[in-house]
Amino acid sequence: MMSIGNLHVRFATPFGSLEAVRSVDLEIPAGASVGIVGESGSGKTVACRAAMGLLSGSNVQRDGTVVFDGKELTAMTREEVRNEFGTGMAMIFQDPMTALNPVRRIGTQLSESLRLRLGMDKKAALARSAELLSLVRIPDPEAMLKKFPYQLSGGMRQRVMIAIAISCNPKLLFADEPTTALDVTVQAQILQLLSELRRDLKMSMVLITHDLGVVANHTDFVAVMYAGEVVEQATTAELFANMKMPYTQALLNSIPNIEMKSGERLQVIEGRLPNPVDRPKGCGFVTRCSYAQQKCHDEHPPLLDAGNGHLYRCWYPLGHTIARKP
Amino acid sequence: MRKKYTIPTYFAFGWLGFAVFLAVFGSFIPIDGYQVIHGDFIDSPPFTSGHWFGVDSNGYDIFSGIINGARLSIFIAVVSVGLGGFIGSLLGVTAAYYRGRYDSVVNTAFNVVLSVPNLVLALALVAVLATNVDINEAVPTWRRLITLVMSLTIVIIPILGRIARAATLAWSGREFIVAARSMGMRDRHIISRHIVPNVLPALIAVGFLAVGVVIIAEASLSLLGVGIPDGASWGGMIARGRNDLEYNPHALYIPIIALAFTVISTNHVGDVLRGKLDRREGRL
């Protein structure tokens, strides 16, 4: 459905060029759900927005190729790419509190894309809007159309956002941390809803999250990002069966576990992401990695293939025979 | 939930309504025109029968002058603020939305105009544009009026333009703008449907303050001798009345009171409206 090749995104900052996304290759098969995992600042959101062509501004530089549905987005004009928005690809945003216009009614916001993009008249668009709202399980959709965003809870707003995103039947849906801003009890419902919608509407989906648990339940493929690079990539089953990257393991360990003893401390990943303006020459994770060797400081690891499409970026992957530092 | 209006608010709305009523329908009120000379009543104090507000030393009825002045003062203020607000917000909103070099140019232009004191700028514009090459030939009133409105518009453009630009900068960074783009909305649609409704409350509130500023600016220009001639506006009446402050103070005070009430009312209404219109965002 979409294939991203050698994607680079650079921002010009007063401190120098900031490379937020470095050489990302990603394949999103039709009908599949791909998870992108990584901590804050790892470049997940920027990579997706750049792939879609939503980054704008004179200080942004994007390189690489993005092919969507047989069309090369990176070679198209702005207007041509705009025609793909909504009907071809759509995005759900992280924070439903800010992703709806506070002064416009839900019905107006939901029907405007139907009217502008699909050419429906006002009446048909409002009727379709009510259908979409019931599709995302909002009770009493007719009444909801007349409400303002401030009258809705976070979960309801996120459902409205999903309704807007799927309103023009996109083939590819980017869900940018759709549950991060929500209550834990609502998170599972929203993810469940997204998975069902994806199946029913036969969409492909890119699910951005920092929660490997979410990825395990809702995706077919996973790409783990760190400091702007894909550091591990495999099918979801393969990734959890044969984890190669110490970083992926550290992410997994930092999820609270119901079987933990009371008083036991949650594992955290010490340290911070490397400075994106002034990167170290070796592996980006080296200062935080408990398995780091001298080679990790000196040489940047390439993306290696463990066979069966399992890619990783590590000199000494988990399960490697070399003696490890404790 | 709804906050009750206070007495000053009722007064401000009432006065503005009354002033606008006078401005629109004043010419239908069956009294003599403001330029009719009442020779028998020269220098009559207020509450003289038939001349409620008195008569000045030229024999002009002050009540009639106030009504006529309301029309001119309010017309000048509303037209300049409307025109200046429209042009200013068009520039400000597009500058903040598109950024880049266009924004730098617009913002610099705003700052340059703002750096000249309002009155000096208006004075210079009127003095240059509303004079004839032959200084003995009188400048027609309509030309002075147009020049006055134009120069006050130029004064208003950067004031409201900066407000529009600042508000747009804040709103266009919001996620719902990106969300609208991600659904394939055109820039024009995003500006008119998503940004303008959010920017408008701030503009309306400041617009009312600007009306007050313009009314005062027009009066000041009249005092300096470049306003509408013949004492046709409130400022003009003040300019003419100040000559006989000792003998005939009401000829000065009455237009001043009308002007002060109007300016205080517009400021107050601006404040109240801002409070009301901001509430939707406040409840988020």
Image (cartoon, grey):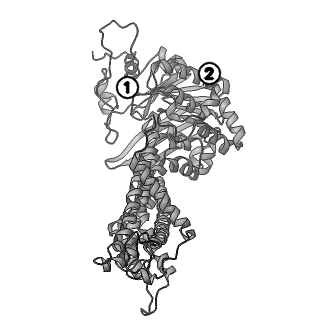
Circle 1 packing at 10 Å, graded few (<14), some (14-19), many (20+), is: some
Residue closest to the eye, A216 or B181 = B181
Q: Which corner quadrant of the image does residue A200 belong to?
A: top right
- Which numbered dot is residue A315? 1
Is residue A147 visible in the rendered image? The answer is: yes
- A135 and A305: which is toward the camera: A135
- First in residue order: circle 1 vs circle 2: 2
Q: For this rendering, which residue is in front, A50 or A193?
A: A193
- In the image, taking residue A89 as reference, residue B108 lies left or right, namely left
Residue at the image position 40 percent from the left and 71 percent from the top: B218
10 Å neighbourhood of mark 2: few (<14), some, or many (≥20)? Answer: some
Above or below, comparing residue B82 to residue A168 in the picture: below
**Viewport quadrant of the N terminus of chain A:** top right
Give the residue at x 40% y 75%: B237
Quadrant containing the C terminus of chain A in the rendered view = top left
> Residue at point 41% right, 66% down?
B214
Residue A98 is marked as none
Residue B127 locus on image (x, y percent):
39, 81
In x, y percent, where is residue A310? 50, 23
Disc 1 to disc 2, C-alpha distance: 39 Å
Q: Nearer the viewer, mark 1 or mark 2?
A: 2
In the displayed structure, A71 sits above or below A209; it is below
Of residue B266 and residue A122, the one placed in the foreground of this image is B266
Q: Mark 1 belongs to which amino acid?
A: Trp
Tell me which chain the residue with mark 2 is part of.
A
Residue A202 occupies which quadrant of the picture?
top right
Q: Which residue does the numbered mark 2 point to in the structure image?
A: A196
Q: Position of residue A117 (x, y in %)?
A: 66, 43
Amino acid at dot 2: Glu
On the image, the x and y values in percent for residue A188 come to 51, 18
